[in-house]
Image: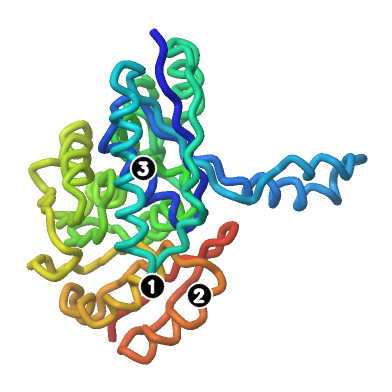
Amino acid sequence: MNYLELTITTTSEASELVADKLWEYTGYGVSVADGKDIIDLIENRRQTWDYMDDGVLAGVNSATFVKCYIDLDGSDKVSAEIEKSLISLKNSAKDYFNFGTLEITKRVVDGDDWIEVWRKHYKPIPIKNVVICPEWINYEPQRGEKVVRIDSNMAFGTGEHETTSMCVEFLCGLIKGGEKVVDVGTGSGILGITALILGAKSAVMTDIDPVAVKTAKHNAELNKVEDRALITLDNLLDKSEGVGDIVVANITADILSVLVGDLKNHVNAGGKVILSGILREKAENLNALYVKNGYKTLKSIAKGEWVAFLMERL
């Protein structure tokens, strides 16, 4: 069976939003390829490789490409709806994100080929003592490992992205058992679910996207933690009543700046706050803003172009 492959040209900072929007139109798969990651990899290895042709970088674009697949039948109508939806998304969030061109290219592909390639792309991802594993892989945990199973067919948030993996690293060091956790912008639910599997008592998980909420509920059931997870469709923290010992917010620097006041209402005094989704060039200002508003910076992690902070509410 043939499918239509759509490739959207965007930016690294907007790729999660674009991918999340595409999931509303497909159940077959969404992938993200960041050209900057390829360039960084090549540049970082120049000193260790014996030889590299200067032309290697010539064909590498620094843009980010998000792909999705839809049924060929009716694809004209669906692709038009996707284009309209992406334009609407860009207009609604242009003050917070640079979306790039959002140019769409199309090609017909053989379904059996790309599904197999897409599944081969996802492997178990070890992050400290946590292993993020696609649900179709029968992974046997090693001694001391905690396995978090995620349905990667449904939503963004598989553990591969630096912003997610840094949050998981912080959670591994924070969760001792019995904590109450609030996960803001939960997406696939990966962070709230990870906290529960590590031993947290409960997790309030919020998102403004109904597809994300549905996905997070599915993944909570997949990991048998649904009885300890309250997953709600909320406008970030505006309507959420969750108050936690740990709050994790993997969003963007601009939105985190807006939330600096609201977050204090949802973390206990002395509680910890994990902030991620922050581009390096915005990290210093965001850190200063939170320190000014009653937080103490305990630690920061940087991976690629992204930074995450662990903070304490004073």
Q: In the image, is 306 to the left or to the right of 51?
A: left
Q: In the image, is 156 to the left or to the right of 263?
A: right
In the displayed orientation, state which residue is furthest to the top: 1
Residue position marked by numbered label 3 in the rendering: 83
The image position of residue 139, as x and y in percent, is: 39, 24
Amino acid type, label 1: Asp
The image position of residue 283, as x and y in percent, is: 50, 75
In the displayed orientation, state which residue is furthest to the bottom: 292
Assess disc 1: are there few (<14), some (14-19) or many (≥20) residues with their C-alpha within 10 Å of its C-alpha. Answer: some
Q: Are marks 1 and 3 in contact (CB under 8 Å)?
A: no
Amino acid type, label 3: Glu
Residue in the picture at 38% in, 54% down = 172
Amino acid type, label 2: Lys
Residue in the picture at 9% in, 67% down = 239
Which quarter of the image is occupied by the C terminus? bottom left
Q: Quadrant of residue 290?
A: bottom left
Residue in the picture at 22% in, 48% down = 196
The image position of residue 305, as x and y in percent, is: 57, 61
Which secondary structure, mark 1? helix
Which secondary structure, mark 3? helix
Does 82 appear above or below 167?
above
Disc 2 vs disc 3: which is toward the camera?
3
Residue position marked by numbered label 1 in the rendering: 254
Among numbered discs 2 and 3, the one appearing first in the sequence: 3
Among numbered discs 1 and 3, the one appearing first in the sequence: 3
